[in-house]
Amino acid sequence: MSEELHALLDLLDLERIEQDIFRGRSGGPVVVPRVFGGQVAAQALVAAGRTVPADRPAHSLHSYFLRPGDPAVPIVYSVDRIRDGRSFATRRVVAVQHGQPIFHLSASFQAAEEGMEHQEPMPAAPDPLTLPTAEEVLPAHADRFVHPSVAQRILEARAAIDLRYAQEPPFVTAGEPREPRSQVWFRTNGKVAGAADTPLTHLCLMTYVSDMTLLDSVLLAHGRGGWAVGDVVGASLDHAMWFHRPFRADDWLLYDQESPTSQGGRGLAQGRIFTRDGRLVASVIQEGVIRVPRGG
């Protein structure tokens, strides 16, 4: 594994401090002065998953971001065992900092079983190996950001993930409204190995990445570049995921994203995640605050 991936896995390896109570930390470069939402969601899913038998992987999660997380202090995750049935288990997780809840998650887990099968076909997308890396894209457009250092900070914060844009990202085409749809390919920067190589780890890694680019499609519809360009102020409000089929986060995954609507200072985006051979492995929906600064 790369050093960056090892550090991310260490970040997701929560400390158990009491029965069904875990402690997590923030780590690495901070792009904005708050904890990255994907980190909190992934850590909360780790906490929930560690109270469920390993043969019951998560099949869905629903969550709300309540307050900005403080990257300087640990996060305490308290798990409630809502239900343990013959096939399904349900957990509720509350993340707390400074005595206040900052995040709430409900997750459902299911024992494997046979059933009816169908899926939408995978959309057309360029091969990931033909696309430029983030190390090639971000520095080339650093002058578009509110400060050139932002590009480097984003690279450092995403160093554990190889994420490649299939089309030009919002910060490149700011000022030019486009179809509200975007695609990225992603995989971890190195193979997940050893004790960390579990189905729960791959679910949590996908959850971590799923919050990185989903609202891009909202920005594209309005020709906005995002917070890094300085033409919007935004934050995730809620996040829901459904895990359909097994996958590995260290193999290429296509994240196909679109926005059906935005209104009232909020934007809605939805995504489908496919393996390279076309299996639909996850669906995602997120709403976020997206406001245009006064005079912007």
Image: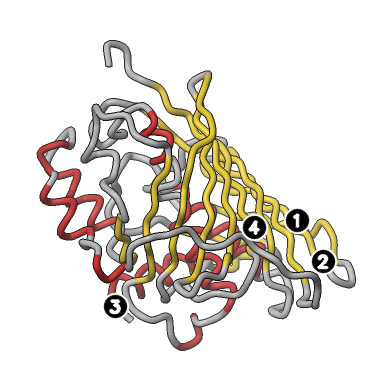
- Foreground mark, 4 or 3? 4
Question: Does label 2 or label 3 sit earlier along the sequence?
Answer: 3
Picture coordinates of residue 56, whole percent (x, y): 73, 74
Picture coordinates of residue 62, whole percent (x, y): 66, 48
Cα distance in 3D space between marks 3 and 1:
35 Å
Between residue 200 and residue 125, name the one nearer to us.
Answer: 125
Q: Which residue is mark 3?
A: 2
Q: Which residue is mark 2?
A: 88
Quadrant containing the C terminus in the rendered view? top left
Cα distance in 3D space between marks 4 and 1:
20 Å
Picture coordinates of residue 14, whole percent (x, y): 52, 67
- Foreground mark, 4 or 1? 4
Q: Amino acid at mark 3?
A: Ser
Q: How many marks?
A: 4
Q: Secondary structure at mark 2?
A: strand
Q: Which residue is mark 1?
A: 80
Question: Does label 3 or label 1 sit earlier along the sequence?
Answer: 3
Q: Which residue is mark 4?
A: 242
Residue farthest toward the top in the current orientation of the protein: 295
